[in-house]
Image (spheres, rainbow, N blue to C red):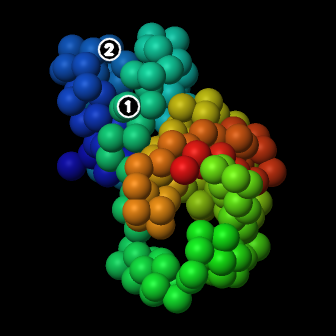
């Protein structure tokens, strides 16, 4: 089996655009080894994201990258649900949830939340073990943006939209998202 993150990317492209387009965007998938050094994985991820940027429109990219995102752990979901039960309002929830995210935060401004991970290091499985890498397209980070959407759909008990403001993998100092509730 191919490296799982690459399997998910190929699978998402194939589900959205068909096998032929998946091969056009990610021809390396057919010959991927079971293991690769982290630095090589990052280089390959950048190549594939650059191809997606070149060949696809932004809406299609977002559908593909948000199709199979990481889920919350059971512990994270439990913490969120317990915190929701104890909170009297979304404002109160954001204050308390920020304590869980520390050094990150959630700030509420009318119908908008600004979410910061606050780690100053990418936590994505692609990059967390690397001390340095070439910044990549925010296309990569749409997967994390999808995770933020899943998280805040649960928190707000309704569908939300999220937009990437800055990410470490793209050369930023933090991962920051603007969530519309």
Q: Is 13 in front, or is 26? A: 13
Q: Is residue 37 visible?
A: no
Q: Residue at horizontal 29%, vertical 35%?
A: 12
Q: Position of residue 71 (x, y in %)?
A: 37, 62
Q: Is residue 171 above or below residue 4?
A: above
Q: Residue at x 52, y 88 (%)?
A: 86
Nearest the viewer among 136 and 94 is 94
Q: Is residue 171 above or below residue 108?
A: above
Quarter occupied by residue 139:
top right
Residue at (72% x, 68% y) in the render: 104
Report which residue position mark 2 lands on.
Answer: 24
Mark 1 and mark 2: span between their CA atoms? 18 Å
Q: Please state which of residues 110 and 33 is positioned toward the viewer in this rendering.
A: 110
Question: In the image, residue 19 lies at what x, y percent?
Answer: 19, 21
Q: Which residue is mark 1?
A: 63
- Mark 1 and mark 2 residues within 8 Å of each other at the beta carbon: no
């Amino acid at each position: 089996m191919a490296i799982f993150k690459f399997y998910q990317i190929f699978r998402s492209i194939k589900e959205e655009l068909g096998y032929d387009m998946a091969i056009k965007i990610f021809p390396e998938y057919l010959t991927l080894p079971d293991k690769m050094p982290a630095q090589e994985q990052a280089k390959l991820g950048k190549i594939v994201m650059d191809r997606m940027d070149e060949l696809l429109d932004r809406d299609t990219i977002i559908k593909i990258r948000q199709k199979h995102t990481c889920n919350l752990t059971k512990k994270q979901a439990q913490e969120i649900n317990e915190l929701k039960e104890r909170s009297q309002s979304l404002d109160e929830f954001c204050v308390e949830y920020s304590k869980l995210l520390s050094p990150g935060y959630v700030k509420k401004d009318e119908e908008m939340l600004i979410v910061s991970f606050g780690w100053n290091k990418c936590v994505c499985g692609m990059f967390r073990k690397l001390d340095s890498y070439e910044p990549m397209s925010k296309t990569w980070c749409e997967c994390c943006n999808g995770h933020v959407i899943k998280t805040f759909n649960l928190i707000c008990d309704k569908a939300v939209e999220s937009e990437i403001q800055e990410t470490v993998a793209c050369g930023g100092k933090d991962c920051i998202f603007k969530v519309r509730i």
